[in-house]
Amino acid sequence: MTRSTFAILGAGAIGSILGAHLVRAGHEVTMLARGHRAAQVGREGLRIRGLVDIDARVDVLTDPSRFDGADVFIVAMKTLGTAAALAPLRDARVGVAFSIQNGMWKNDQLIDVFGQDRVLGSLANTSGELMPNGEVLFTRNVNVFLGELVGGISERATHIAQTIDASGVRSTAVPDILAREWTKFVGWAGLMTMSVATRATTWKYLSDPDCALLLVRLVRETAALAHASGMQLTDQHSLLPIRTILHESDEAAVAAVVRSGQEFKVGAPDHRMSSLQDLEAGRPLEIEETIGDAVRRAHRLGLDLPLLETCYRLATAIDRTARL
């Protein structure tokens, strides 16, 4: 049986970045992975390039029945297959768990497996890309936010955030994690669908006025779902100017999105959403647990969000036809 201080489910870009930094800082880390990536990490370790150069050997576990638990359990895999990956871990001795996945479904899934008292909210304003040779390109290190789902600052969230931050991945405990998660998701939903529809780098579609207008309208619809769920949104922790989009005219909102595109052109000209990376690599997109979940939440609340549903259907079709 295997137990460690940190266990990370998923050895993709962000999971690898966190794992490598924590190992370098002297923490016991177990990576739960499978298939080619598990074999690669077991053979070559975690190799991080870009903002830092780290080569770290790490324990890799491919058989979930051998996982005894961890003090901190981090879900960093794509949303597809998460329920199946977590199912064998229900009896594991996990101190606290959190997910840095996209979407709002992730917290509900962890609560179902581990119980609400052992789940924190989290979002990662951090970027990386898993390269074909197994290296991970670490491109953005802004913040990994942690907080209690019921609100407020807790000792456990603060301790975990400080530990991750001290390892080199910026992290902060915050009192309003759910509002921040919703703010990120509202922007992410628009960026994700525009990226796969245009297949363009981020600055290009943000700088196009027609695409910017579609994105503005989609963000407004998704924000209506957040508000109906009791959340107030801010400009913080989104790649988009959320307040301007929600409270200014179409013209002002589009102009603000186009300015964001120009900022990306200067500061991150090669930035691509992970959804576009997946599409171009022939990997399935994470749609059902993110935008699909939002559409179903809207239906349950009696909200009519036609553009959100249209984008959900469009992204699903693009995903399906790209892999025929």
Image: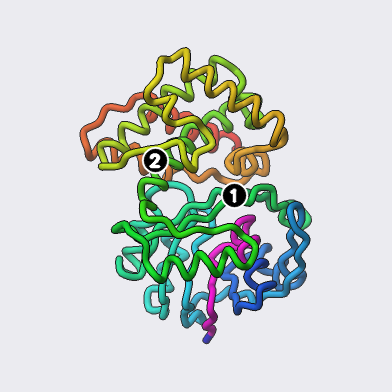
Q: Secondary structure at mark 2?
A: helix
Label 2 belongs to which residue?
292
Q: Which sits earlier in the primary sequence, circle 2 or circle 1? A: 1
When asked about the image quadrant of residue 296, the answer is top left
Q: CA distance from mark 2 to mark 1?
A: 28 Å
**At which x and y percent is residue 79?**
48, 52
Q: Residue type at mark 1: give it.
A: Val
Residue 206: in magenta span: no
Q: Nearer the viewer, residue 322 or 232?
A: 232
Classify residue 108 as left or right of residue 23: left
Classify residue 189 as left or right of residue 153: right
Label 1 belongs to which residue?
142
Residue neighbourhood size for the residue with mark 1, other residues' Cα within 10 Å, grouped as few (<14), some (14–19), many (≥20): some
**At which x and y percent is residue 147?**
40, 59
- Where 5 falls versus 149 (above or below)? below
Residue 323 shows in this picture = no
- Where 132 falls versus 17 (above or below)? above
Residue neighbourhood size for the residue with mark 2, other residues' Cα within 10 Å, grouped as few (<14), some (14–19), many (≥20): many
Asked if the residue under mark 1 is in contact with the one under mark 2, i.e. CB atoms within 8 Å, the reply is no
**At which x and y percent is residue 139?**
69, 48
**At which x and y percent is residue 149?**
33, 58
Give the residues drawn in magenta, as a range.
Answer: 2-19
